[in-house]
Amino acid sequence: MRILIVEDEPELARHIRAALLRQGHTAEVEADGAAALQAALRGQPDLVLLDINLPTRNGFEVLAGLRQERCPALVLMLTARGEVNDRIKGLKAGADDYLAKPFALDELVARVEALGRRGGGPQTGTGLQVADLHVNVPQRLVVRAGRTIALSPREFDLLQVLMQEPGRVFARTELRDRVWQGEHDFDARIIDMFITRLRRKIDVGFDPPLLHTRRQVGYLIQPPA
Ligand code: CA
């Protein structure tokens, strides 16, 4: 993968870059928020490793800029350990995952590899349709009622799993296994967060709602009866 490391601690950035290069990735470093946003929009990396406290623009501002410009890169936020609010804030703003600092480099590499495997499950056909919601899997394109909807890579993967079996209720644990394969220490609230984000994009402003919650059970996509 082509990875952009946004980190203003030179030693840490250097170690991260070396670890990623050893795994066969290409990696560049930006230490400044505004410069990082420009670099990401220009360079179209596959993944952005994003620190929060940065000069000029903080990580949340960089993330907002990326998503506003519909940058499709995966974003892994580097948050301070215990700062649960930062995690939630980052996920709400469109991050795909987070890693708490300080972390072991092996942990970082594993997380990057796991994100890179996104959408690695079997894909059935090229088009998925529920009511007026259409998903083109190879192009990773989502259209509802003629309007193109921009999803982050994880949001897309989650929608794809739900759309493959309309009407079936997926438990959180199953969604975790299918969308977040192989990640330990997984917090089920992350799924709820992604469902909220997905609902905001595919259902708010459209009628009828297609994404449903079965309390205590899970989530499903269902066409109107
Ligand atoms: Ca920093």
Image (tube, grey):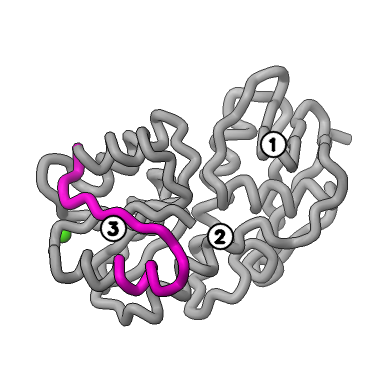
Amino acid type, callout 1: Gln
Q: Which label sits on residue 172?
A: none
Give the residue number, with chain letter if any, for mark 2: 191
Label 1 element class? loop
Q: Nearer the viewer, residue 136 or 166?
A: 136
Left or right of residue 111, residue 66 in this image: left
Q: Position of residue 94 (x, y in %)?
A: 43, 45
The quadrant where residue 198 appears = top right
- Spatial CA span between label 3 and label 1: 32 Å
Sooner in the amino-acid sequence: mark 3 or mark 1: 3
Q: Are marks 2 and 1 in contact (CB under 8 Å)?
A: no
Kindly report which numbered mark, 2 or 1, lies closer to the viewer in this rendering: 1
Q: Which residues are magenta?
A: 17-34
- Spatial CA span between label 3 and label 2: 16 Å
Q: Position of residue 35 (x, y in %)?
A: 20, 39
Sooner in the amino-acid sequence: mark 3 or mark 2: 3
Left or right of residue 187, residue 121 in this image: right
Give the residue number, with chain letter if any, for mark 1: 139
Give the residue number, with chain letter if any, for mark 3: 86
Q: Nearer the viewer, residue 168 or 103?
A: 103
Name which residue lies at 24% across and 73% down.
15
